[in-house]
Image (cartoon, rainbow, N blue to C red):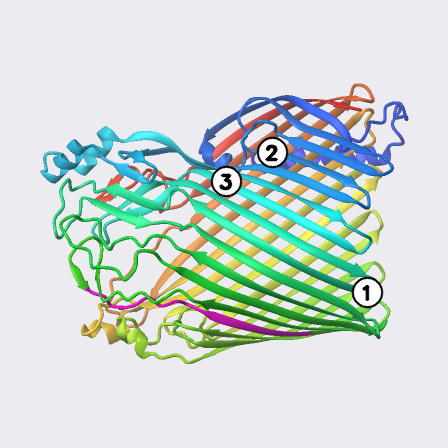
Amino acid sequence: MTIRAASLAASLVLGLTASLALAGPAAGQDADTTPLDPNLRGIEFGGRFSNASGDVARFMRFEDLRSGALINRARYTREQETRLVHFEADRVGWRDQHYAASVNQFGRLEAWFDFRGVPFRYDDNTRTMYAEASPGVFRLDDGIQLGIQNRTLTLDAAAQAFSLPFALRSQRDVYDGGLRFHASEHLDVNVRTAIQRRNGYQPVGAGFGFSQALELPGPIDDRTTEIGTSVEWANGGRLARVGYDGSWYTNHADTLIWDSPVRATDLATASSQGRMPRWPTSSSHTLSAVGSSALPGRSRITASVSRSQWLQDAEILPFTINSALTSPPLERSTVEGEAAVTSAMVRFTSRPSRWAWFNATVRNYDLDNRTPVLEVPNQIKYDQAPQVAAVPETEPLSFSRAIVDLEGSFTPWRHGAIRVGYSREAVDRSFRLVEETTDHTLRLAYDVATLDRVTVRADLTRSKRTGSGLDEEVFSDIGEQVSLRQFDIADRTRTQGTLIVTVMPTDLFSVSAWVGGGKDDRSDAPFGLADASFGTYAVGVDAAPRDGVSLGLQYGLERFSSLQRSRQANPPPSPQFTDPTRDWSTDGAERVHTLTASFDVLKGIPRTELRGAFDYSRSRSRYTYALVPNSTLVTPVPLPDITNAWQSGTIDVRYMLRRQIALGLGYRYDRFTLDDYALNPSTIDRLVFGTTLLMGITDRPYTANTVFVKLAYLW
């Protein structure tokens, strides 16, 4: 569906709905043919026929849209005087299936359960020479390793001859459930549990330092279990709640081991295999308390406090798996990781009069990392020769954050309100280059609720972050420019605002327009991210020309730009390190255009409901490299723009054969095009680039047509 075709389809739909708006009540639309509510009791089943070409994995990234028979939707609700029972199911048996059930015994017990499957398809055309000998252990045939080591076989020839295709995918299944027991009029007990399981593979970067890089299908086999309990008491304007929350994460693939594709035997300067840790098994435990009480003058105070313990005791891997080297001894065999987290909040809210309200909040968050320091005077990098460690001991990061937020709203006239706010955030860190930062933020907003069918809302925010405790010699010690700044803690001034205007000439028609933008400025950052800005502009139209008919159309433009500065230089004592003629910058810019349209015709056509939607998005990104005057660097070659365009159109027709039986027909069109110089198939046209071994992951376009045939029975 091109834009021209979409415009023609939209014109036909607008003409149809306009004619319906002028027409009177449809003949035959009486109580006997009025359908039952499909959200109460009903089942919808049928078939799906999908024809996709190109990058099918991208098309079905988070969905399962394969062809086949399916129960698309099922609902059951039964309400009695003292009880409500509800069940629902979607896409039964497919990878993105969903089930939910709930029981509400009014005034006594509420229980619910929810299951959702979330597939993720990375790429269906990946290839690798590796075989997974055991979970997380990837091996190559000994003959391949020996042949490449002895130079009787090249890496490129081996990749072409021995790489096998496979689909790179993963599956996430989420189980969620809980109950709320009303022990008495004022006392409730809550229990909730959630289990998330993930299985499959994802791309992982591995290798042996800068000498060789490779991609592996890293296994995913983990489980997260969460339990939350609380007891809540409420009486009048007072509330108290205490609770416990626990979370346990278990990773059954916490280590990755792989063979070197160029060596079969170990040398002191080259290893035949590599090893790296992955996400460690861990747990957290939290005790919390919340209290709230009404105060005179239409005021309320609320306070909460929590104390958490984070635990992680994974095995510390030796510095190397290279048998030709002796790994330096470790002080202990496991991490013994522990952190204590304390969080507290006090909020006061008051509305002393109808024209004013006030809110004050104080928050504090403290992460105390209690993991014992691990001495590492010597180390082995990249499974090669031992050396003295640049950082001789671990640095357990800790930080505390204190926030004060004040906000007030004033309504000097009936339909308008002015809001003013101020917040201060102070962060104290350990083992960061800037030890302390303070953010001051001012907010101003104005709302006009109604002004002759016009609604206006505007807001402006201005914030400034400053830091202290920076020791520039630390940069020098690690061979970095002393003027380099890390973007998340560097001094920064931020300005952003929005304006939204809605006009309703009639109750059946409205036009909305909004504009927003902002800029981050880091004027004291000669190297690193200097500034970034964004802007959003949009206009939308909504219309309801008659009962049961609605139309919507919206266009938006988003822009983003950034400026980063750097210096291409060897570390000291090279004279390049302080040579300003080697400075260069990157100016990034992106523009995104979006168009959305929808229509619903639920009345006006006998026995028929008609729905449709169209979404279109086009993006263009450009990176411009610039050199300083009199530069001694080679003039950079301009990179081509990165572009992509996505469009999706759906139309759905539902015809009531009888009051309880409906026949449905749906069509969905998807198309995605892109041009990315880094990940194009023409760029990644092989698996081997020098000593780099890839899996062939590329960005490719796709086109898909999907037809749905549905039969629904309602009761």
Q: Locate residue 405, reporting x and y percent.
A: 65, 73
The first of marks 3 and 2 along the sequence is 2
Corner quadrant of residue 499? bottom right
Q: Rounded to the nearest whole Å, what is the CA distance between mark 3 and mark 1?
A: 41 Å
Amino acid type, residue under disc 2 in the picture: Ala
Name the foreground residue: 272 vs 5.
Answer: 272
- Residue 684 placed where, x, y %? 31, 40
Q: Quadrant of residue 311?
A: bottom left
The residue closer to the viewer here, 94 or 247, is: 247
Read off the residue under disc 3.
Answer: 197
Residue 404 is inside the magenta segment:
yes
Total residue callouts: 3
Label 3 or label 1, whichever lies nearer to me, is 1
At 66% across and 48% down in the image, what residue appears? 191
Identified by mark 1, the residue type is Gly
Q: Is residue 513 above or below residue 696?
A: below
Would residue 105 appear left or right of 368 to someone viewing this image? right
Name the element at disc 2. Answer: helix
N-terminal-most mark, 1 or 2: 2
In the depicted view, which residue is nearer to us: 207 or 410?
A: 207
- How much space separates mark 3 and mark 2, taking CA atoms? 43 Å
Q: Magenta region: which residues?
A: 388-406
Q: Amino acid at mark 3?
A: Arg
The residue positioned farthest toward the top in the image shown: 657
Which residue in the protein does label 2 denote?
A: 5
Q: Earlier in the sequence, mark 3 or mark 1?
A: 3
Callouts 3 and 2 close, C-beta under 8 Å: no
Identify the residue under disc 1.
237
Within 10 Å of disc 1 (Cα), the crowding (few <14, some 14-19, many 20+) is few
